[in-house]
Image (cartoon, coloured by chain):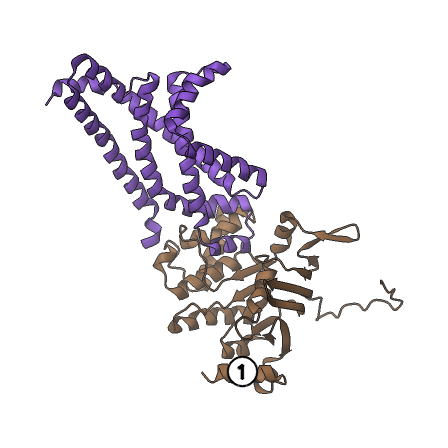
Amino acid sequence: MHATVDTPAPTSAPDAGDPIVRFRGVNKRFGDLHVLRDLDFDVGPAEKVAIIGPSGSGKTTILRVLMTLVRPDSGEIVVDGEHLYHRRVGDRLVPADERHLRKVRTNIGMVFQHFNLFPHMRVLRNVTEAPIHVLGLSKAEATERATGLLEMVGLGDKLDAYPSQLSGGQKQRVAIARALAMRPKVMLFDEVTSALDPELVGEVLSIIRKLAEEGDMAMLIVTHEMSFARDIADRVVFFDNGQVAEQGPPADIFTAPSNPRTQEFLKAVLQH
Amino acid sequence: MGFDLVPILLRGLDVTVRLTLTSAALAFAIAIVAGLGRLSPFAPIRFLAGAYVEVFRGTSVLVQMFWFFFALPLFGITLTPFVAGVAALALNIGAYGAEIVRGAIRSVPTGQIEASIALNMTPALRMRRVVLPQAFVLMLPPFGNLLIELLKATALVSLITIPDVTFQGVALQQTTGRTTEIFLWLLVLYFALAYPMTLAVRWVERRASAYRKA
């Protein structure tokens, strides 16, 4: 089974680096629905990947599996060199316990379609809560970090508001600040503009665009906003039927898709 | 109108109030523990909490009280009337409260749990700082109802020799025979205690849920 390799292992290229996220043979079924089929999928450090595809294709499940919200049925996921759902005991891999999950999860952050802000906390505390109680930052450090991030998303004047007093776009910007405050290496965006009124989509996208331009954070973006995907992604992944049907630079995927399913999908969505 | 009866009835007021507040505090603690127990990931804990709820909800609180006061001494456990009364009331109301706690925790949206996981909170931290504060707001109205139920159920302790307002009323009725006046005053007294409680719970509820419509 284990082939010995005589040739020296290739040293990793200085700029390519190991992937920050690696899926190998990942399967997930919900009843009869096979949402992830033997999925192999890598994300490079600092890479911005847009995942597009028809609804029900499993693209959101990729993010949810990575965020440990949904356990895969089989396969391996490695985040920053560390197995996510397994832990190494000697040379065997055993299922991870909650402690191990928490360790690997520190690298991952997520922004949700429905924001999921904590409604009983004011904006500032939404953003300081986890840095204080999970990362162990002092209140002063966490407040400074949170204030900076909230200013960056244009909400420096809303620190004392409750989420119920904010618009959808403002809520989503708080949610982005909240996720950034944990300083993850990989950030997952799950259809973050789908629940917004059309006129509020722009303010959220422009912040994500800013993050994409400046950041060394890897970003995995599930979206229906094709022009946005085209603008910011290093790579566009067309996901269909639980698998990567086609992927490549946005210019290729959007102008000359080779897979007929991709062509069909793009034709349907770009008509609108 | 029988105003002359009131001072005598009021002698039991202090007992009724103390009994209500002590049992309520204890019932609240029991409800939280048993409600969390019913949601525990560990099956034996779920079973124990479930058995407690079913037994104490499914039997008469008066008979429970008789057990604590008349039957336990036969097993060598003698409780004072007050302790027996509080134990029965708190365990009985606590069982109902546990179901309220369980229901309220389960109605906190899953998105809140997912956000807590994404922020890498421990399950304990998530429960304490995210789930329970939101569940608490949902618990308040049904807890208010239970508190009134509890107050009225304290009348039963008169049957295990505790001199609460009902006990005083019954004693007075036996000596004076002024049945209608005495029992009418008793109704008034219970209502005079219950209504401010309703208002107080409503006030707490408004304050606690202010963030929703702020």
Residue A203 is drawn in which quadrant? bottom left
User: Percent x, y for residue A225?
Assistant: 49, 76
**What color does chain B have in the rendering?**
purple
In the picture, which chain is brown? Answer: A
Question: What percent of the width, then of the height, locates residue B188?
Answer: 19, 29
Q: Position of residue A180 (x, y in %)?
A: 52, 60
Looking at the image, residue B174 lies above or below residue B134: above
Q: Is residue B155 above or below residue B103?
A: above
**Residue sitting nearer the eye, B88 or A139:** B88
Q: Which residue is mark 1?
A: A266
Q: Which residue is nearer to you in this view: B72 or A185?
A: B72
| Percent of width and height locating residue B61 | 38, 28
Residue at image point 38% right, 43% down: B139
Residue at far left of view: B1
Type of the residue with mark 1: Leu
Local secondary structure at mark 1: helix
Q: Based on the displayed image, in which of its 4 quarters is residue A24 positioned?
A: bottom right
